[in-house]
Amino acid sequence: MDIQITATKSEGAERRLRVAVPPARVADARAKAVSRVAKQARIPGFRPGKAPAAMIRKQYASVIDQEAVELLLREAFEAVVTQEKLELVTQPHAHDVQFGDDQGLSFELRCEVRPEIVLARTEGFSVMRPADAVTDEQVQEQLDRLRDQRGSWAPVEGKASEGDMVTVLLATADEDGTMPEGREYRLVMGAGQAIPGIEELVMTLEPGATVEQPVSWPADFPDAAQAGQTKAVRATLTEVKRKALPALDDAFAREMGDFESLAAFTAVVRDDLTAAAVREADAAARTQLLDEVINANPFDIPPSWVQQMLRAYAEAYRIPEAELVKFGDEFRGMAERQVRRDLVIETLATREGLTATEQDLDEKVAELATARGQEPGAVYASLQKAGRLRELERSLTEERVFSWLLGRNTIVQG
């Protein structure tokens, strides 16, 4: 296509190009539009397709212009992408469209292109891998958490203490001093479920008692309008419950699963914690190594990809519509970092031939099938139905890329 292309902006992944289509090409597009419109037009006194072209142009001028512009824009888009060798990542848009009989057609094409990623330096880095040893204290903390989950609440007499669960009616005075009806809450004292002033107030009460007195809101309270204010609060304590924990013995171990003794259960807990610690240490080392590669090899990223990542985060965290702008401002840096990490992994996988193969995928499915005691075909079908095959393939590719990077850099054990 005979067009003139002039770059008006080339910044990062964004491109803006001024495109001019000559009058002769515009006239040709108009003629084609007239021919198409004439076949469908209904003009009294003429059979379809037989009305004079001049009459068609006069009565359907706006339709003809619209069709001609749409045709020219499509053709121009394709020509620009081909001639400029643009690897688009978003749909291009036409801005400032100018169209006329004598001036031809001109517009500014705005688009985003895939960044050029060289990754000249991927070796010579040194990163710290955190220690993955599990201490006896960590094992005991996990056992205590599991005991706490198995604990049961029972009513007790007297005032509440830290760790007790209370049922309480709370009311806060309105701005005019009116005290509304109280609302019932169940709160665990000391768990941060209520501001300290209210917890202190509740813990002065015996079950059945009511008190009303001023309470100060913390200066760092999330709602700035209430931060630092003092309000009248009425509290009525209904019930106090205390959690009773099961004994940490062989009987407890048997309740937690097929374990003959507490020692056997403790060994499994230690193994699980060790495996988790190894995964976390590996992940930390990998993250540091990727960050080193990113910092040593700057490249631009398309803003639209960052927005897509932010939308994915917002959906995962179920962020309300009204909070999306604030959420985007806070998490944009994280989204940009994730896009860069994904691009580095993808680039290395392609460049070094590290992309997971069908054989890799089949072997992983067979491994999963063995662990689950199922047939590989059934596991494959299950993953395919759940739409997780692509995810599995991507994770295998990442493993190969990280193995490649780890073999070319120094990992210092913490």
Image (tube, rainbow, N blue to C red):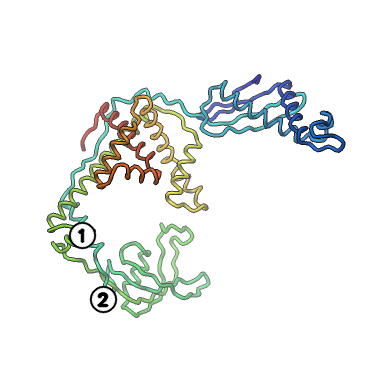
Residue in the picture at 64% in, 20% down: 1
- The label number, if any, that marks residue 156 in the structure image: 2
Within-10-Å neighbours for mark 1: few <14, some 14–19, many 20+: some
What is the C-alpha distance between the residues marked 2 and 1? Answer: 28 Å
Q: Is residue 260 left or right of residue 341?
A: left
Q: Indicate which disc residue 229 carries.
A: none
Which residue is rendered at x = 78% and y = 32% of the image? 38
Vertical arrangement, residue 8 with respect to residue 146, above or below:
above
The residue under the point 43% across, 72% down is 183
Q: Quadrant of residue 347?
A: top left
Quarter of the image holding residue 69? top right
Location of mark 1 (residue): 256
Q: Position of residue 130 (x, y in %)?
A: 24, 40
- Determine whether, in the image, residue 73 is placed left or right of residue 191: right
Q: Residue furthest front?
A: 47
Could you tell me residue 132's position as x and y percent?
A: 21, 42
* Labels 2, 1: front one: 1
Left or right for 122, reference 130 = right
* Residue 35 in picture, x, y percent from top left: 75, 29
* Outermost residue, top side: 2
**What percent of the width, then of the height, locates residue 332?**
45, 41
Q: Amino acid at mark 2?
A: Val
Task: Name the foreground residue: 189 vs 203.
Answer: 189
Earlier sequence position, callout 2 versus callout 1: 2
Of helix, strand and loop, which one carries label 2?
Answer: loop
Query: Hey, which quadrant is residue 387 in on the image?
Result: top left
